[in-house]
Image (cartoon, rainbow, N blue to C red):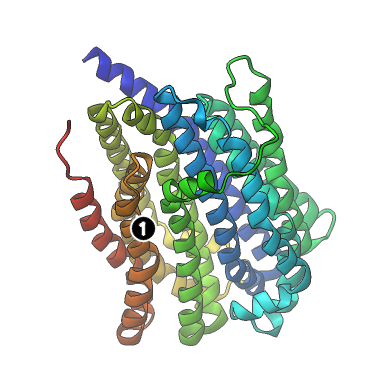
Amino acid sequence: MEKERSLLKRFFGYVIPNIFGMLGMSAYVLADTFFIAKAHGTYGITALNLVLPIYNIIYAFGSMTALGAATEYKILTAQGDSSGENNFSNAIFFTALFSIPFIFAGVFIPEKILKIMGADVHIIEVGTVYTRIFMTFTPFFMWNYVLNAFVRNDNDPKTAMVATFSSSIFNVIFDYILMFPLGMGMPGAALATACSPVVGILICLTHFLKNDSKIKFKVIIPSLSKQVMACKLGFSAFIGEISSAVILLVFNSLILKLSGNDGVAAYGVIANVYIVTVSIFNGITQGGQPLISETYGKGQIKDSRRILKYSWIMAEIFAVLMLVVMMVFPAQITNIFNSENNAEMAKIAVGGFRLYFLCLIFSGFNIVGIGFLGATEQALKSFLASIFRGLIGVVVIAFIFAEFLGMTGIWLTVPMVEMLTMIMIVIFTSVKEN
C-alpha cells in the first residue's frame, strides 16, 4: 500500500504540471482564433482552419522524433544502459533536417499550399503572409518539442511545464499587441505564434545548468538507426498529430461542399476548442509516459499498468466534465468567436458541438491507451490503433456518413471512430500482469 501511494504521488507530480503545460500550449490556438475572428471575421477563421493541418504535420514530425527518442532514453537509462545518451543530439539533428522542406514551401509557395487546402481567392489574400511566416519558423517548433520531451524525461516536469506555459502566455499577449495596437493583423498573429517556441526553448535550456541534468548536447555523427528506433517508439505520437491534420483536411473538403465558408468557420471553432480538450488527455499521457517507461524498463510491469489505470481514470473524469460544458454552453462558446454575428455560422456550430464532442468519452481512453502501448515498446499495436483512429477510420467513415447524413454525418464521424478504436485498445491492453 505504501508503494502504491508513493507511485500515485509520483504520477500526480508528473501529470499535473504536464496538463497545465499542454493547456498552456493549446491556449495560443484559441487566442489566435479569437483575435483573428475579431480582426478578420469569418474569412480569418476559415484561413486559420485551412492552415492548421500544416501545424499538425510539423508537430507530427517533431513529436515523433522527440517522444520516441526521449522514451528510448528513459528506458535505457532505467536499465543502466548509457547508449541512450546521444539520443538528444540525434533528435536535434533530424528535426532540423525534417524542417527544411517546410521552410522552402513556406517561403516560396504559401499561396499554392492554401489553394491545395481549398482556399478561395479571399482566403488566400488573408492567409498567405500568415502561412509564410509560421512555416519559416518550423525548426523552432520542432526543437521546442525535443527539448520539452527530454527535460520531462530527465526528471524535471516542472521546468517543462513552465516552458510550455510561458511560451503560450507570450503568444497570447503578443497576439494582441501585434494585431491591434500595432495594427499588423494576420502577420502579427503569425509572428506571435512563430516566436513563442523560442521562449519555450530558452526556458528548457535552463535545465542544462542544473547539477542533476543528465542530458547534454554533443557534436556527434548522426545515427540513422537511432532515428529509426525513435520513429518506431514515437510513431503513435506522429499518427496522433497526422490524424488531426487528416481530420481537418477531410472535414474542410467535405464541409466546403456542404456548407461553404460558413461551415468551415463553424468547424474551425469546434476544431480549436477540441484541441484544448485533447490537450488535457495529451498532458495525462505525456506526463505518465516517463514513469511508464521507467517502470517498464525495470521490469515492474504491475506498476506500469497501475499508472495506465490512474491515467484512464483521470482522463475519463475530465472527459465527463468537458462533455457537460459542451452540451450546456455551445451557443455561448460559439459567440466568443462570432464577431460578425454570423447567424448561419452560429447555427452550424451549435449543432456540431453537441454531436462532435460525444467523442470525448472515448478520446481520452484511446489517447492514454495508445500512449501506454508506445511507452512500453508495443509499436505494432500502437501503430494499428493509431492508424485506424487517425487515418483509415476517419477517412472511410467521414465520406460514408457525409454522403448519407450530410453535416450530421460529419459531426458523428469522430465519435464513431473513437468508439471503434476504444474496442481495439481494450483488446490490445488486456494482457496478464507478470
Q: Is residue 6 visible?
A: yes
| Residue drawn at x 39%, y 25% as measured from the top left | 79
Kindly identify the amino acid type of the residue bearing the numbered disc 1: Ser
| Quarter of the figure with residue 6 | top left
Q: How dense is the environment of label 1, judged by Cα within 10 Å: few (below 14), some, or many (20 and up)?
A: many
* Vertical comparison of 415 with 315: above or below: below
Q: Residue at x 65, y 84 (%)?
A: 120
Residue hosting label 1: 386
**Number of marks:** 1
Residue 289 at x, y = what percent? 40, 36
408 in relation to 367, above or below? below
Residues 388 and 192: in front is 388
Q: Indicate the quadrant containing the C terminus: top left, top right, bottom left or bottom right.
A: top left
The relative height of residue 257 versus residue 355 in the rendered view (above or below) is below
Which residue is more in the foreground, 172 or 345?
172
Residue 43: x and y in percent read: 65, 74
Quarter of the figure with the N terminus: top left
Q: Position of residue 152 (x, y in %)?
A: 52, 31
